[in-house]
Amino acid sequence: MVHSSTSIMKKERQMLIMKQINLHNRALSSDLSVSLHVSEDTIRRDLNELAEAGKLVKVHGGALSKSYQFSYSTVNAYASSAKQVIAQKAASLIKKDMFVVIGGGTTVSELIRNIPMDISATFFTVSLLTALQLCDHSHATVIFVGGTIAKTSQISAGGEVISRLADIHADLCILGANGISFNEGVTESDMETVQVKRAMMKASKQTAILTISEKLDSVQRVRVCDLDEINYLVTELEPDSGELKAYKRDRLVIM
């Protein structure tokens, strides 16, 4: 029965891989290799198996959550009930005739479901999925800030996108977070995404970060901004929850 312990180890390893990918939407093979203390070849084999089983989307250098596929169904999204609570709270920030710069991801997708269908507002987005979903809102003006689509984050990126964002003067920027901590602020896994997110924030008077509480106190490779640079932190927790105590700042509204 020697093989059984190996299969259990493999099963547990693949569960941990799925946890990371569901939590952060994507993961690099190199990072998974380090955190799980196995070779990149082992991780690649695991990712191939999980992709064949339809559990994730394999890409060069790592894998993406299934939620990144061309569909905006959030029914099977990770932590969907928490994201529904966040979406209901965040929808209250969007007012009539606002100019809003908005990102992508399953939490943002859930938010769009909670925005009144007849709202008259202007939305700028670098996410093709977000743009298509917003098109269902008959009175909304939807502007896709296009460029080369970064395959890891599935948003448009590069100098042209950053230049176009610099010409926008929006009321509110709405972004998901890959990692957030009271010391390191909001963090992301790749520089390309960070540059676009910074440009989106710069284009807006205020910024709201939407995140499930499971991502609190987690840090990714590259910093997007300090906590002092955001205006709203929206989680599924009650604002006075002990888990949020360290995040309180003078100008930061916790929702």
Image (tube, grey):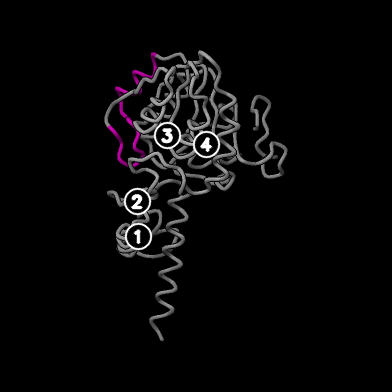
**How many marks are shown on the rendered structure?**
4
Q: Residues within 10 Å of mark 4 (few under 14, many from 20)?
A: many
Q: Which mark is residue 104?
A: 3
Which numbered disc flags the more N-terminal residue, 1 or 3? 1
**How much space separates mark 4 and mark 3, taking CA atoms?**
16 Å
Callout 3: 10 Å neighbours few (<14), some, many (20+)? many
Between disc 4 and disc 1, whose residue precedes? Answer: 1
Q: Are marks 4 and 2 in contact (CB under 8 Å)?
A: no
48 relative to 244, above or below:
below
> What residue does disc 4 label?
186
Q: Nearer the viewer, mark 4 or mark 1?
A: 1
Magenta stretch in the rendered image: 149-167
Q: Pinpoint residue 88: horizontal percent, then vertical percent.
A: 58, 33
Residue farthest bottom in this picture = 1
Q: Is residue 117 above or below residue 33?
A: above
Which of the two marks, 2 or 3, is nearer to us in this view?
Answer: 3
Amino acid at the residue labelled 4: Val
Residue that mark 1 sits on: 50
Nearest the camera: 184 or 51? 51
- Cβ–Cβ under 8 Å for marks 1 and 2: yes
Mark 4 vs mark 3: which is more N-terminal?
3
Q: Amino acid at mark 2?
A: Ala
For this view, does 99 lie left or right of residue 146?
Answer: right
Label drawn at residue 135: none
Q: How far is the residue under mark 1 from the one under mark 3?
A: 24 Å
Q: Earlier in the sequence, mark 1 or mark 2?
A: 1
The residue type indicated by label 3 comes to Gly
Q: CA distance from mark 1 to mark 2?
A: 10 Å
Q: Earlier in the sequence, mark 4 or mark 2?
A: 2
Q: Position of residue 82 (x, y in %)?
A: 57, 44
Which residue is identified by label 2? Answer: 63
